[in-house]
Image (cartoon, rainbow, N blue to C red):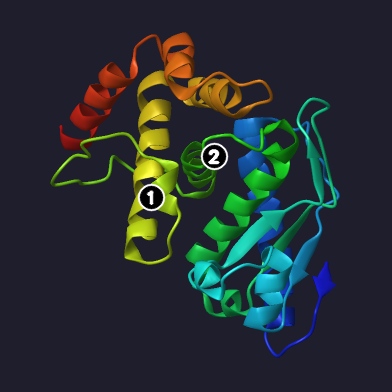
Amino acid sequence: MTDLGGPRSQRVLDRVAADIGAAVDAVDVFWGTEWPRDIDVVATGTQPQFEAQAGGGPAAQWADIAAIAVADHVDPARRTATGQRIVFAPGAAGMSERAFRIVLTHELFHYAARGQTAVDAPRWLTEGVADYVARPRTPRPEVATPPTSLPSDAELADPGPQRSQAYDRAWWFALFVADTRGSPALRALYQQACGDGHTDFPAAVHDVLGTDTAGILADWQRWLTR
């Protein structure tokens, strides 16, 4: 673990140490045990420090991000990733226990799957599956109006309430697939749609779930509202 200084960074690392065992177990149950165990966690001392560690760019894009898993180099063909680390913003020290565990487990899934995830994988699916692994198992969410379309990467682009809602929709979809087809089918969908040399999402839906995008959208809508 790496402490970059600041009044809250040690608090973040203490919380990671307390929760990492359960996070590893959750990832193992879904993804299996064949992933790197030399987990580097970086606790930043200031928000600008976090933004630099996270990859730079406009500060606004990081305003509602508590942590991110990054890597120096990824080679999906060899299923390897080098220079991996999970970087926490200083604000993570003030999160609730439940929220912190979810964020840690979410980013740990990205860490575990990074070597098998293509750089052009559908981001919404990678995020939805990470949330499925990280969030406690719950009944179907209560949704007054079902989505009229499948999630998309564009919905995750800009910070604010709409991004939070987009993450929820991606999680709902992953939860739906696991609930109706089984957790192994969700993993297979991830590998088919997000792995090296992946097919496009409609082809992955056909190959893994045995339907087309219109059919899976209709099934998802019925699952959300019944």
Q: Report how many numbered discs are placed on residues in the image.
A: 2
* Callout 1 amino acid: Glu
Placement of the C terminus among the 4 image quadrants: top left
Residue 93: image quadrant is: bottom right
Determine crowd level at label 2: few under 14, some 14-19, many 20+ residues with C-alpha closer than 10 A. many
Residue 5: image quadrant is: bottom right
Q: Is residue 50 above or below residue 152?
A: below
Residue drawn at the location 53% of the way across and 66% of the way down = 65
Q: Percent x, y for residue 46?
A: 67, 84
Q: Which residue is mark 2?
A: 126
Residue drawn at the location 28% of the way across and 40% of the way down = 140
Cα distance between the residues tagged 1 and 2: 14 Å
SS for callout 2 = helix
* Callout 2 amino acid: Thr
The dot on residue 90 is none
Residue 120 or residue 71, whichever sits in front? 120
Q: Which residue is mark 1?
A: 155
Residue drawn at the location 14% of the way across and 44% of the way down = 145
